[in-house]
Amino acid sequence: MISISLPIAYLAIYTVLSFPILFIAFRHGVHGLLGWLYLFAFCTLRLVGSGLQISASKSEDVDKIATAALISSIGLSPLLLATTGILHEARFHLRGNSGKKTGWFLVFLIHFFVATGIALIGVGSSTFKPTHTKSSDHTLAAVGMIILLHSWVAILVWAAFTYFARYKFLAPANYHIGLKLLYALFATLPFTLIRIVYSTIYVFSRSAALNPLTGKLGVRIGLILIPELITCLIFIFAGLTTIPDSVIESPGGGTSGGQRYGMKRMNGRERG
């Protein structure tokens, strides 16, 4: 039997969080669009999954239960990709256009790994059915989760490299925007790791207590809801506190909002 209290909470929480995320995506401009739109996609998946859970609780449809559990697991993908996008935005503010091609290559590489992992989990979706599962499907889903875990490690390594290779001589506001976003990203990584490890353990063990829909309520709150919610709230707080005054394109190839904001602050000091 699927309880609908938690899905209803998901609907309320992620409906509310979707609005500030869209606002942040709009205000951060083109350099931040990738990360914030993926974070919005994560919220959307959570809303869809919650709707399916409520529907499945009424009909006890095995296929709906499996689909809702699958969506719960693949919801990790936009969360990882949002982290990658926000890291790319932070990197732009900390390093400017230095290594731009390398940055986009790493974004593409992580996207490729995450997409591959999700595809394997999708093909092995029968793993999430309460009935008998093919051993081959179980293997595919397990490999997919391992790939997502390695994607998390790749993000951690890239974030650490970005921190140690930052350029302190950039515009002050640029530097502080990038640093705030990077610190927020580091703060979220333990929570996304908890979420990935939980899903990995469930796929390998298929323990009824760890089932993302019908498992123990404490497990679903502590290992799914709370880590994801904290991750979203940290990113939203960081996004709202790093909104530049304006985003103005210059004829020479573009000035980010952070650069413009930095020049305003420096000019203000000179006048004073």
Image (cartoon, rainbow, N blue to C red):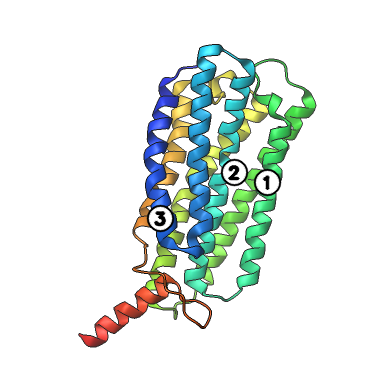
Q: Residues within 10 Å of mark 3 (few under 14, many from 20)?
A: many
Which residue is most to the left? 272
Q: CA distance from mark 1 to mark 2?
A: 8 Å
**Mark 3 or mark 1, which has the lower sequence index?**
3
- Residues tagged 3 and 1 counted as in contact (Cβ below 8 A): no
Q: Position of residue 96 (x, y in %)?
A: 51, 75
Asked if 141 appears above or below 272 in the picture, the reply is above
Residue receiving disc 2: 77
**Residue 156 falls left or right of residue 143:** left
Residue receiving disc 3: 24
Q: CA distance from mark 3 to mark 1?
A: 25 Å
Residue receiving disc 1: 115
Q: Position of residue 84 (x, y in %)?
A: 56, 55
Q: Nearer the viewer, mark 3 or mark 2?
A: 3
Amino acid at dot 1: Ala
Determine which quarter of the picture holds residue 101. bottom right
Secondary element type, mark 2 = helix
The circle drawn on residue 9 is none
Q: Residue at x 62, y 35 (%)?
A: 200
- Residues tagged 1 and 2 counted as in contact (Cβ below 8 A): yes
Q: Residue at x 48, y 53 (%)?
A: 36
Asked if 131 appears above or below 147 in the picture, the reply is above
Q: Residues within 10 Å of mark 1 (few under 14, many from 20)?
A: some
- Residues tagged 3 and 2 counted as in contact (Cβ below 8 A): no
**Residue 272 falls left or right of residue 109:** left
Q: Position of residue 77 (x, y in %)?
A: 59, 43
Secondary element type, mark 3 = helix
Q: Position of residue 152 (x, y in %)?
A: 59, 49
Q: Nearer the viewer, mark 3 or mark 1?
A: 3
**Mark 3 or mark 2, which has the lower sequence index?**
3
Amino acid at dot 2: Ser
Asked if 250 appears above or below 116 in the picture, the reply is below
